[in-house]
C-alpha cells in the first residue's frame, strides 16, 4: 500500500501565499492618498466600464487590485452588508472598520480553506470623518490581514517603487490638485524611468468631506483631470541636455544694445486588456 502524499501546513500556506502574490503583482497599482478635504484614489485603468474604485456607503469607498471577478464579488457583498446594517439599525452604524473586519474574515477563511484557491486580490476600505484626523484607510491582503494605513498607501503592481516615490513627494494636507499630480507621477515612476500616463487611462475618485450631500464619493471625469494635470505638466521644465549648462542665461553674456541680438530663450517644457 502506497503512502499518502503529505505536505506540511507551513509549506501549504507558503505556496498559497506565493500564488496569490504573483497574481496581484501582475495588475496595475492603486494609490490611496489623504489630502486636505478627504481621501483620493488613483489607478491606471484603461477600461471605462470595469472600475477598480467604487462607493460602498455614504462615507465609505472600496478599491481593489487583482482578479476583477473576485474583488467585484467582495464589493457587492460589502454594499449589501452596509445597506442591510444601515436599514436595520442606523446609517451611523455602518463603519469602515466594521466592513474591513467582515472582509478580513471572508478572505482569511478562503485563504486557509483547502477546498478552493485563495483570492488573488488586495483591497482598500476607506472612510472619511468630519476632520482629517478622523479619516481611516484599511488595507486588506489576500490572507485576511488588516493594516491601518496613514497618509498614503499603495497596493498591486510595483507597489514598493510607487510607495518610495510617494514617500519623497507626498505633503500632508495638500490640496486636491497637488495630491492628484503627485499620485499620478508616482504611478508613472519606475526603475527604468518615468512615463506620462494618458488622462484617458486614469481612474480617479475622491471621498470629499466638503460635499453637502450625505454621499461623499465622487469620480473625477476626464475634463476635470485634464485641468488638474495640465498645470502640473506645464510647470515642469524640460531637463537640460547632457553636457549643456543648466541655464542659458548663466552661460551666455547679456546682449548689448549695439549688437541687436535677442536675449536667449530657454527651451519650452514638454506639453503636457489590463489585469485589473
Image: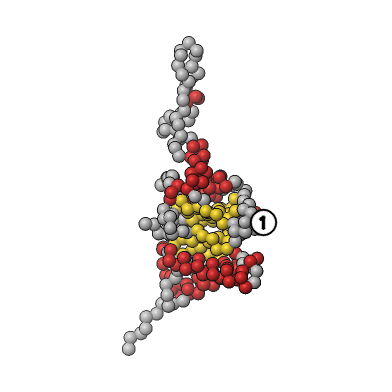
Residue 98 vs 130, above or below: the answer is below
Q: Secondary structure at mark 1?
A: loop
Tell me which residue sits at (51%, 63%) in the image. 123
Residue 131 vs 235, above or below: the answer is below
Residue 34 vs 99, above or below: the answer is above
- Specify whether residue 203 is in view: yes
Q: How many marks?
A: 1
The image's colouring method is secondary structure
Q: Position of residue 128 (x, y in %)?
A: 62, 58
Asked where in the image residue 217 lies, by quadrant, the reply is: bottom right
Q: Position of residue 152 (x, y in %)?
A: 56, 54
Viewed as shown, does residue 252 lie left or right of 100?
left
Quarter the C terminus occupies: bottom left
Q: Residues within 10 Å of mark 1 (few under 14, many from 20)?
A: few
Asked where in the image residue 194 lies, by quadrant, the reply is: top left
Q: Position of residue 272 (x, y in %)?
A: 45, 39
Tell me which residue sits at (42%, 31%) in the image. 243
**Residue at the far top in the pictured view:** 258
Q: Position of residue 218 (x, y in %)?
A: 55, 54
Q: Which residue is mark 1?
A: 130
Tell me which residue sits at (44%, 67%) in the image. 70
- Specify whether residue 11 is in view: no
> 182 and 17: which one is in front?
182
> 252 and 67: which one is in front?
67
Quarter the N terminus occupies: bottom left
Tell me which residue sits at (50%, 67%) in the image. 76
**Residue at the far left in the pictured view:** 1
> 13 and 225: which one is in front?
225
Amino acid at each position: 500500500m502506497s503512502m499518502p502524499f503529505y505536505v506540511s501546513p507551513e509549506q501549504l500556506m507558503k505556496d498559497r501565499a506565493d500564488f496569490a502574490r504573483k497574481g496581484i503583482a501582475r495588475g496595475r497599482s492603486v494609490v490611496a492618498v489623504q489630502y486636505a478635504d478627504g481621501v483620493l484614489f488613483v489607478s491606471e485603468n484603461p477600461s471605462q466600464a470595469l472600475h477598480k474604485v467604487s462607493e460602498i456607503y455614504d462615507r465609505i469607498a472600496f478599491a481593489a487590485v487583482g482578479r476583477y471577478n473576485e474583488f467585484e464579488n467582495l464589493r457587492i457583498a460589502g454594499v449589501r452588508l452596509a445597506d442591510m446594517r444601515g436599514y436595520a439599525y442606523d446609517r451611523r452604524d455602518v463603519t469602515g472598520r466594521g466592513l474591513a473586519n467582515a472582509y478580513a474574515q471572508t478572505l482569511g477563511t478562503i485563504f486557509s480553506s483547502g477546498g478552493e484557491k485563495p483570492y488573488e486580490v488586495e483591497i482598500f476600505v476607506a472612510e472619511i470623518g468630519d476632520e482629517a484626523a478622523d479619516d481611516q484607510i484599511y488595507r486588506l491582503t489576500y490572507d485576511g490581514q488588516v493594516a491601518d494605513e496613514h497618509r498614503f498607501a499603495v497596493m498591486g503592481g510595483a507597489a514598493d517603487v510607487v510607495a518610495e516615490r510617494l514617500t519623497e513627494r507626498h505633503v500632508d494636507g495638500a490640496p486636491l490638485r497637488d495630491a492628484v499630480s503627485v499620485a499620478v507621477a508616482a504611478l508613472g515612476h519606475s526603475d527604468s524611468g518615468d512615463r506620462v500616463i494618458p488622462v484617458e487611462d486614469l481612474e480617479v475618485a475622491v471621498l470629499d468631506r466638503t460635499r453637502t450631500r450625505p454621499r461623499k464619493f465622487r469620480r473625477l471625469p476626464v475634463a476635470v483631470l485634464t485641468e488638474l494635470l495640465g498645470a502640473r505638466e506645464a510647470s515642469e521644465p524640460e531637463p537640460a541636455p547632457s553636457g549643456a549648462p543648466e541655464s542659458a542665461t548663466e552661460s551666455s553674456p547679456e546682449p548689448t544694445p549695439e549688437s541687436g541680438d535677442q536675449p536667449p530663450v530657454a527651451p519650452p517644457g514638454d506639453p503636457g486588456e489590463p489585469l485589473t
